[in-house]
Image: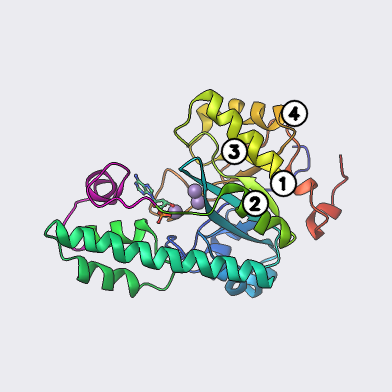
Amino acid sequence: MNGEPRVDLHTHTACSDGALAPGELVLRAAGAGIELLAITDHDTTAGFEQAEACAAASGIDLVPGVEISAAWRAQPIHVLGLWLDPAAPALRRALAGQAAHRAQRMVRICARLTALGLPGARLLQTVQARPGLPTRAHLAQALTEAGIVKRTEDAFRRYLGRGTAAHIAADWPALEVVVGWIVAAGGIASLAHPARYRLSAGARRRLLGDFKAAGGTAVEVITGGNAAEREACADWAVGFGLAGSIGSDFHDPQHVWNPLGRLAKLPDRVTPVWRRTGKPHSTKQPLP
Ligand code: AMP
Ligand code: MN
Ligand code: MN
Ligand code: MN
């Protein structure tokens, strides 16, 4: 081993579409040997606040984080904000706007479901009764629980995914705007799962260039289930002068194919993003 900490900088809790309460996630991460953990719920930092005490008791270095929904040339893009100040007023205002957008989009999607002859109002109520910020994953679960589809994947394939009858394209703020929010809140922006976007090679290079120019610092080189794309992600990090981050994108212990704490290490040629912070953990290690 090269002395690097065991890291997971991309996880979800019940504050968005994860299954575990923030404290439960921290306990599970501690059990999996994770030393540096970020809770990165969709468009909310609420999980960090709820998990702080538990992390301190477990000896986990908990990074304040968020996964913000953005748009780049009409393509939804996810940007991780890490080591940011969750109390920064401008960030709080920005995330309140994201939450409002999510709530409105859910109403519109459910109206579409009603038009398709499904119980849209009841499904909306079910989603609104959940504690976290609403996502399509919640609605997929509601459709499953109502017996309308068998599995959540079917809900996306039939109703919620791009090109289906109840799909509403979200009007997320531009990538540059979102990176700006993160940087202004003292955070580090990492482009989440860069291989997962359906883009041509040229478009992906332009995305990475625009992300870097906007103030982005890192790309997620190791994510749950991306073994086949790791070398390409590492090449993008090195080629664009970006650091690398590691994150499982853990949502649910029942998703046995994507557990906490079983991630590969970064290829040696990639600078770990945790060395680019001036925050406590990085002081334990020499800067490159
Ligand atoms: P939203 O941010 O509201 O658009 O919801 C997107 C969330 O739904 C993602 O973060 C995933 O957790 C989940 N999701 C998206 N596409 C699928 C899919 N095809 N199957 C299962 N879950 C999905
Ligand atoms: Mn999700
Ligand atoms: Mn994502
Ligand atoms: Mn995620």
The magenta region covers: 145-169
The relative height of residue 213 versus residue 145 in the rendered view (above or below) is above
Q: Which residue is mark 4?
A: 269
The quadrant the C terminus occupies is top right
> For numbered disc 1, what is the local secondary structure?
loop
Dot placed on the residue nearer the N-terminal end, 4 or 2: 2
Q: Which residue is mark 1?
A: 215
Is residue 15 at least partly visible in the picture? Answer: no
Q: Is residue 165 left or right of residue 130?
A: left
Dot placed on the residue nearer the N-terminal end, 1 or 2: 2
Cβ atoms under marks 4 and 2 closer than 8 Å: no
Q: Which residue is mark 3?
A: 222
Q: CA distance from mark 4 to mark 2?
A: 25 Å
> For numbered disc 2, what is the local secondary structure?
helix
Q: CA distance from mark 3 to mark 4?
A: 13 Å
> Looking at the image, is mark 4 or mark 1 nearer the viewer?
1
Query: As rendered, which of 54 and 97 lies closer to the eye?
Result: 97
> Looking at the image, is mark 3 or mark 1 nearer the viewer?
1
The quadrant the N terminus occupies is top right
> For numbered disc 3, what is the local secondary structure?
strand
Query: As rendered, which of 81 and 174 lies closer to the eye?
Result: 174
Name the residue type under label 1: Gly
